[in-house]
Image: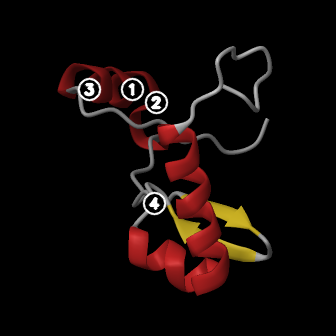
Amino acid sequence: MGGHRFFSKVKEVNKLWQEILGEDFLCRPRLSRIYYQRRFFSYPLRPMNALRGLGAWRGLRIVLSYLKRQLFPYRREDTFEQW
C-alpha cells in the first residue's frame, strides 16, 4: 500500500532486501524532514536550520523552556507532556 523506505547500515540486511526484490529494489537518496508551522526542518535537527525556521523569539522561548525543565524537572511524570 504505497511506497516504503527501508534504511539500514547493516550490509547483510541490505543484501537480503536486494535478493528478495531483485530488479524491483530501487535505491534512492534519503531525505527526512519535519513539517512544522508550514515549514520544513532538517531531521535530525540542525540548530541553525531550526533557528532560522522558527525565528529568534520562538527559538529563544524553546531554549528557555528546555533550560527551565533541566533546572526544575517535574517531580512526577504522569503525562506524556511531563515526560
Q: Mark 2 and mark 3: span between their CA atoms? A: 10 Å
Type of amino acid at the residue the image marks with label 3: Lys
* Residue indicated by mark 2: 21
Q: Mark 1 falls on what kind of element?
A: helix
The three-letter amino acid code for the residue at tag 4 is Leu
Mark 4 neighbour density, 10 Å: few (under 14) some (14–19) many (20 or more): few
Nearest to the observer: residue 68 or residue 54: 68
Question: Do the residues bearing badges 1 and 3 touch, measured as CB atoms within 8 Å?
Answer: yes
The residue drawn where x is 53% and y is 62% is 63
Does label 2 or label 4 sit earlier along the sequence? Answer: 2
Measured Cα–Cα span from mark 1 to mark 2: 6 Å
Q: Is residue 78 visible?
A: yes
**Which numbered disc, 2 or 4, marks the residue closer to the eye?**
4
Q: CA distance from mark 3 to mark 4?
A: 30 Å
Three-letter residue code for mark 2? Leu
What number of labels is visible? 4
Mark closer to the chain start, 2 or 3:
3
Q: Which residue is mark 1?
A: 17
- Closer mark to the observer between disc 3 and disc 4: 4
Residue at mark 3? 15
- In the figure, is residue 56 to the left or right of 18? right
Q: Which residue is mark 4?
A: 45
